[in-house]
Image (spheres, helix red, strand yellow):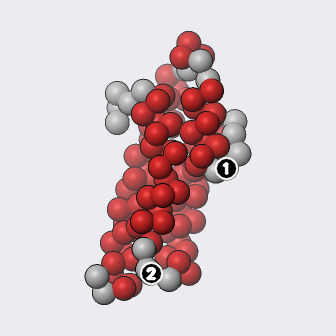
Amino acid sequence: MSASTPDDLATTFQSLARRRREAIGDADPAALRGLVDELQRHVDAAANAVGSAADAAAVAAAIRARPADAWDDATLEDLRREALDAGAVLRRLTAAAEAATGD
C-alpha cells in the first residue's frame, strides 16, 4: 500500500465497517471486543490525521474532500500505516471469529 493514492485510502476506510461486520459474522461481538477496539483505534488515528469524526466513513469522506495538491507525504504515510494496520486487525478478527464459532 506504499503507493496507494488518497482515493485508494478513501476506499479502504469506506469499506472498514462492512469488512468488520463480515469478519465478525455470527460470532458474539462481545467476545471479540479487544480486536474491535483495536480496529477503532486505527480509525481514530486516521480521523485525527485528516481532522474528521472518528468514524471510518467520515475518514473516507475527509480524504475524498481534500484536494490533491493539499496532501503532504507525512499525512499520507500516516493514513497508509493506519490502513495497513487496520487490515491486519481485520484478519485477526476474522480468525478469532471463526475460532469462536467453530467455522
- Residue at 53% in and 78% down: 29
- Above or below for 44 versus 40: above
Disc 2, SS: loop
- The label nearer to you, 1 versus 2, is 2
State the quadrant of the N terminus.
top left
* Residue named by callout 1: 54
Q: Is residue 96 left or right of residue 74?
A: left
Residue sticking out furthest to the left: 103
Image marks 1 and 2: residues in contact by CB distance under 8 Å: no
> Along the line of sight, which residue is nearer the eye, 75 or 22?
22
Q: Upstream in the sequence, badge 1 or badge 2?
A: 2
Observer-nearest residue: 98 or 72?
A: 98
* Whole-percent x, y for residue 50 in the image: 64, 34
Q: Is residue 34 above or below residue 19?
A: below
| Amino acid tagged 2 | Ala
Circle 2 sits on which residue? 27
Give, as a three-letter code, the residue at label 1: Ala
- Horizontal and vertical percent position of residue 11: 46, 39
Query: Toward which corner of the image does residue 26 lie, by quadrant?
Result: bottom left
Q: Dividing the image into 4 quarters, which one contains the C terminus?
A: bottom left
Q: Residue at x 61, y 36 (%)?
A: 61
Mark 1 surroundings within 10 Å by alpha-carbon count, few (fewer than 14), some (14 through 19), many (20 or more): some
